[in-house]
Image (cartoon, grey):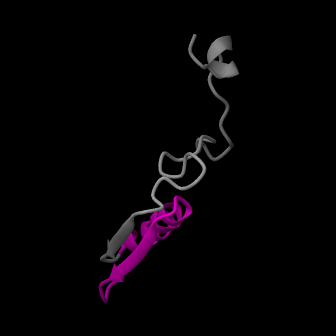
Amino acid sequence: MTDSSPSELSGQPASRPADGRSTEPSPVTRGAGGRLSTRRVVLGVCGSIAAYKAVELCRRLVDAGAHVSPVMTGDA
């Protein structure tokens, strides 16, 4: 028998918050203990929308246990 959520069993779609985001944990942060605890990540940020999105990515990597070293260009 496979594990199924109650919404899958009832045939109803999974509920989502009003903003449309999934309530499931990110694949990067799933699981206790930090899957990335032995990893070092260099995060290159060049500017524009990348600078905005890099903050969320960095936070998720750190939450997963990685050591993140951001490297930014002058435009970032």
Count of labels shown?
A: 0
Q: Quadrant of the C terminus?
A: bottom left
Q: Is residue 8 above or below residue 60?
A: above
Determine the residue positioned at 34% across, 82% down: 72
Question: Which residues fall within the magenta stretch?
Answer: 48-76
**Could you say where residue 33 lies in the image, as x and y percent from the top left?**
58, 54
Residue 60 or residue 45, whichever sits in front = 60
Q: Is residue 19 above or below residue 56?
A: above
| Residue 70 occupies quadrant | bottom left
| Residue 36 occupies quadrant | bottom left
Determine the residue positioned at 50% across, 64% down: 56
Is residue 54 one of those drawn in magenta? yes
In screen coordinates, is 63 left or right of 12? Answer: left
**Could you say where residue 68 lies in the image, as x and y percent from the top left?**
43, 72
Q: Is residue 23 above or below residue 40?
A: above
Determine the residue positioned at 48% across, 45% down: 27
Residue 62 or residue 32, whichever sits in front = 32
**Could you say where residue 25 lies in the image, as x and y percent from the top left?**
58, 45
Is residue 20 one of those drawn in magenta? no
Q: Quadrant of the N terminus?
A: top right
In screen coordinates, is 26 left or right of 39? Answer: right
Q: Is residue 76 above or below residue 50?
A: below
Residue 32 or residue 49, whichever sits in front = 32
Q: Name the outermost residue toward the front.
A: 38
| Residue 7 occupies quadrant | top right
